[in-house]
Amino acid sequence: MARNAINAAVSVLLACVLMASPAPGQKPVPVVDGEAGPCSVEFIALDSNGKSVYGARITVHIEFGFLGLKELDLQVTTNADGIARFVGLPEETETVLFFEAFTESLKGVAVFNPSYKCSGRHSIYMAQRTTIHESASEE
């Protein structure tokens, strides 16, 4: 009886490891865990030509809990396929979540509302970074 339980436990553990391992040829997806709830979102960062952006840093500031007194600042960097994932996000937040992605030359934004849909997959379209002074001086 105990041997069957151990075999079952080992089988479940092996299945979990196999499911979590990337398939051959796939890059592991960077994940940051906010440890604040059940929600998650995966992003793929794309440049203006639709190509994935490696090394884009994606950040988010989250206010949640009673009166928004709890706060999280999370960041993760995309893999070679331009993918990164946030997990452990709170379901109830003070506002929608505003994600910013950037590299030295590109910047993009995305919003995610975990109160509406607790898990999702979104693209962040990134364009050339400019400053207000650069834009104003071109006019």
Image (cartoon, rainbow, N blue to C red):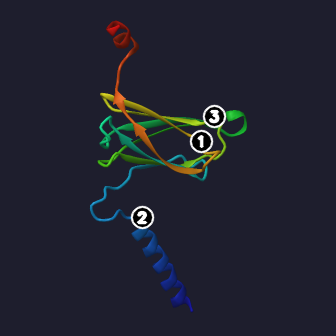
Can you identify the residue that label 3 sits on?
95
**Are circles 1 and 3 on residues that touch, CB within 8 Å?**
no
Residue 71 in view (yes/no)? no
The quarter of the picture where residue 93 lies is top right
Residue 133 shown left or right of residue 121 in the figure: left
Q: Position of residue 31 (x, y in %)?
A: 43, 50
Of the numbered discs 2 and 1, the one sitting upstream in the chain is 2
Q: Residue at x 32, y 36 (%)?
A: 47
Q: Residue at x 34, y 45 (%)?
A: 82
Q: Residue at x 54, y 85 (%)?
A: 5
Q: Position of residue 13 (x, y in %)?
A: 47, 74
Say which of marks 2 and 1 sits in front. 1
Residue 67 shown left or right of residue 74 in the figure: right
Quarter of the image where the C terminus is located: top left
Circle 3 residues within 10 Å: few <14, some 14–19, many ≥20 = some
Q: Which kind of residue does numbered mark 2 sit on? A: Ala
Q: Which kind of residue does numbered mark 3 sit on? A: Thr
Q: Secondary structure at mark 3?
A: loop
Of the numbered discs 1 and 3, the one sitting upstream in the chain is 3
User: Marks 3 and 2, how far apart in space?
Assistant: 31 Å
User: Marks 2 and 1, how far apart in space?
Assistant: 26 Å
Can you identify the residue that label 1 sits on?
113
Q: Which kind of residue does numbered mark 1 sit on? A: Asn
Q: Secondary structure at mark 2?
A: helix
Residue 69 shown left or right of residue 128 in the figure: right
Say which of marks 3 and 2 sits in front. 3
Can you identify the residue that label 2 sits on?
20
**Are circles 3 and 2 on residues that touch, CB within 8 Å?**
no
Quarter of the image where the N terminus is located: bottom right
Of the numbered discs 3 and 2, the one sitting upstream in the chain is 2
Q: Position of residue 123 (x, y in %)?
A: 43, 43
